[in-house]
Amino acid sequence: MRTRLAILFFLLAAAQTSVAQGFAEFIYRAFNAERDTLYVDDLSRMFSVNASLFQKNSAFSIDDLKNLSSLQYSCSDSSSSVSAGFAYKWLSLNLGFSTGLFDRHRTGSKTVLSTQILLPAVTLKFSGSVYEGYYLENAETILQNWPEGTRHDRPDITTASLRVSADYYFNYTKYSRKALTSHGELQRRTAGSAIAGILFNINMASGDSSLVPRIVNDSLFGYHEQLKFVSNTLIGAGGGYARTFVTPAKIYFNLDMQMGLAYNKCLLQLDDAPDRRHDALNFYFQGDLSFGYNSNHWFFNVGGNVLAIESPMGNDGVNINNMNAMLRATLAYRFELEKNYGVGELFTTKWRQWREHRAEKKAGNG
């Protein structure tokens, strides 16, 4: 008996040691991965300034699977935004604001916060958003006797979401995610990588009145519960593949796609019935598509990304499908610096030089 216990203890200790070593090696690779310089060039030593024009939009649908029909809601504020900023080594700062362009029917509002941590092997994403004001895209076909050519606005509908994700790129020595989303690296040759990722996501939708209008066409849409609030909290894992095609003219094209399986907890609050909870497994999809130009000094990128999650709301054949999408165009220019400064050293040195130059100018004018 003692021998068996000793063997079991030894095996457990060895397993724990192996797991700890594997995790330590993973963390080391994530932060200190070496690049193959034939494929990826490190330009983080250069100071870059950038400007972007982008649109972020939110949409959701309540799908009646029995009748193969849906209520399709889209945010009333699909206006574009602009941002400007700079990047140097690990520091990247941008400031943006909404312009109101490209949206003739702007009746809603949106608040979006997002950031990324781009390590050689791992990409971490954090984002949160609140959208207020939606309209029913297919009101003419789904509502009874709805006037043709008019919008069914729902300024009372609000959605909120929180997303945290981590993606591991196996071929991190040759494939650079940073070359697409920041200005610190340059993809020199075509390369791709398998991806493994985890996702934590919360989506919520609510309205002062039911999300399902009382005047839906019964022959098209059979779900009539007075749904005031719905939330979906999920955690999942998946995988996919990413590849960047690079031409001799330094024009590139990138495709990044992932699918995953998630455990989802759904909460429904009804106007005329007790709260309902439902747990289920469901799929999610996220993808990025972009093209552009990347050289030692100039960076240009046009692309978009989407995250789509379809979640069951119960056993009555009704799902809610949440989708967040963004289109972005970015232009950046990198400056050569006289030396390889540290981040703090760069700003203190430039501030001192500016003050000295200002003092000299004042003395000359005197």
Image: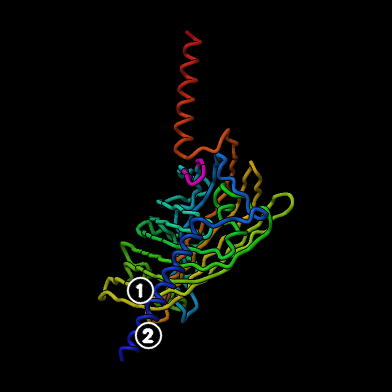
- In the picture provided, is 180 more to the left or to the right than 229? right
The relative height of residue 188 versus residue 344 in the rendered view (above or below) is: below
Residue 266 point in image, percent of width and height: 35, 73
Asked if residue 329 lies in the magenta stretch, the reply is no
Task: Give the residue at the far bottom of this rendering.
Answer: 1
Quadrant in which the N terminus appears: bottom left
Q: Earlier in the sequence, mark 2 or mark 1?
A: 2
Write the residue at 32% across / 86% down: 5
Which kind of residue does numbered mark 1 sit on?
Lys
Which kind of residue does numbered mark 2 sit on?
Ile
Identify which residue, 223 or 357, lies in the foreground: 357
Instruction: Using the image, tell me which numbered label, if any, was put on residue 54.
Output: none
Q: Which residue is mark 1?
A: 265
Identify which residue, 292 or 90, lies in the foreground: 90
Asked if residue 89 lies in the magenta stretch, the reply is yes
What segment is highlighted magenta in the picture? Answer: 84-93
Residue 47 point in image, percent of width and height: 55, 39
Which quadrant would residue 298 be assigned to in this image?
Answer: top right
Task: Give the residue at the far front of this rendering.
Answer: 3
Give yes or no for contact between labels 2 and 1 (Cβ–Cβ under 8 Å): no
Residue 324 point in image, percent of width and height: 47, 61
Identify which residue, 39 or 114, lies in the foreground: 39
Determine if residue 144 is in view.
no
For mark 2, give the secondary structure. Answer: helix
